[in-house]
Image: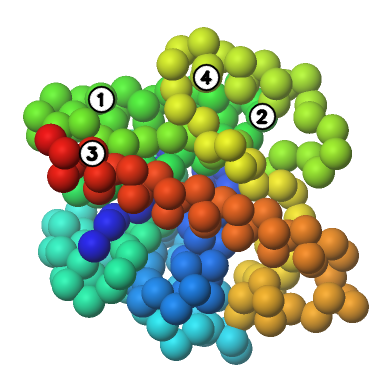
Amino acid sequence: MPVIAFANPKGGAGKTTTALLLATELAAKGAAVTVIDADPERWISQWAKLPGKPGNVRIVADVTEESVVDAIEAAEEEAQFVIVDLEGTASLMVSNTIGMADLVVIPIQGSSMDAKGGAKMLRLIRNQEKMSRRKIAHAVVLTRTGAAVTSRALRNVAEQLRAGGIDIFATPIVERAAYRDLFDYGGTLAGLDGAQVSNLDKAIQNAREFAGEVVARLKAIAAERQAA
């Protein structure tokens, strides 16, 4: 089953939020999803303790550099999708996970600091490709973007990435109050009260479009492997 790793050495890039959105949207489609919570803050594990966690989402926490590979292998046997929310540093755990990933998603905000963190992750991916002697599919997702206006800094980051030949998800993760509410109240976007959360319908649409793009990329990756 595909392993999707969310990684960025810089904290606060929207990594955990994006990973949770993907997990809950895949679960909403009926998929069995295992999330390996390898972030020391354990935000997804805390979310799971709140009401409303889908029954087909399983959380695995307390993984270490030594155990993460075994945890991923075990999750692949049980789940249709394995999502790994990695710690915000370039560690051995991150390297090991990238080496096992089918797709690495690199969340980046529109700032030079985030871009530098993303560049560090890209170098790490290239090193893992050399060690494993295989291509590791990866792409940047722009996060916490404005709903209506694209900032100059964000445009600059996107232009730099494209100039460097870096693949970027067509769907950015827009800054939405609903995404923050998931970590406060638990559950899924569809379970939130639209009367109390602004633009909930747009948040749901954004998350679904991102999840759809991830699935499409995974299908393309699988097709390429079969053709090889």
Q: Secondary structure at mark 2?
A: loop
Contact between marks 2 and 1 (CB within 8 A): the answer is: no
Q: Secondary structure at mark 4?
A: helix
- Is residue 131 among what the camera can see? no
Q: Measuring from the top left, give residue 91's x and y in whole percent.
A: 28, 41
Give the alpha-carbon distance from disc 3 to disc 4, as whole Å.
24 Å
Residue at screen point 29% across, 55% down: 3
Q: Secondary structure at mark 1?
A: helix
Give the alpha-carbon distance from disc 1 to disc 3, as whole Å.
19 Å
Single out the mark in the foreground, 4 or 2.
4
Amino acid at the residue labelled 1: Arg
Contact between marks 4 and 1 (CB within 8 A): the answer is: no
Amino acid at the residue labelled 4: Leu
Q: Which residue is mark 3?
A: 224
Q: Which mark is residue 65?
A: none
Mark before the other along the chain sequence, 3 or 4: 4
- Is residue 54 among what the camera can see? yes
Q: Which residue is mark 2?
A: 110
Give the alpha-carbon distance from disc 2 to disc 1, as whole Å.
23 Å
Q: Which residue is mark 1?
A: 126
Q: Which residue is mark 4?
A: 161
Residue at screen point 70% across, 21% down: 155
Give the alpha-carbon distance from disc 4 to disc 1, as whole Å.
16 Å
In this view, the residue in front, 116 or 222, is: 222
Q: Residues within 10 Å of mark 4 (few under 14, many from 20)?
A: some
Image quarter of the N terminus: bottom left
Q: Residues within 10 Å of mark 3 (few under 14, many from 20)?
A: few
Contact between marks 3 and 4 (CB within 8 A): the answer is: no
Q: Residues within 10 Å of mark 1 (few under 14, many from 20)?
A: some
- Quarter of the image for residue 186 reads bottom right
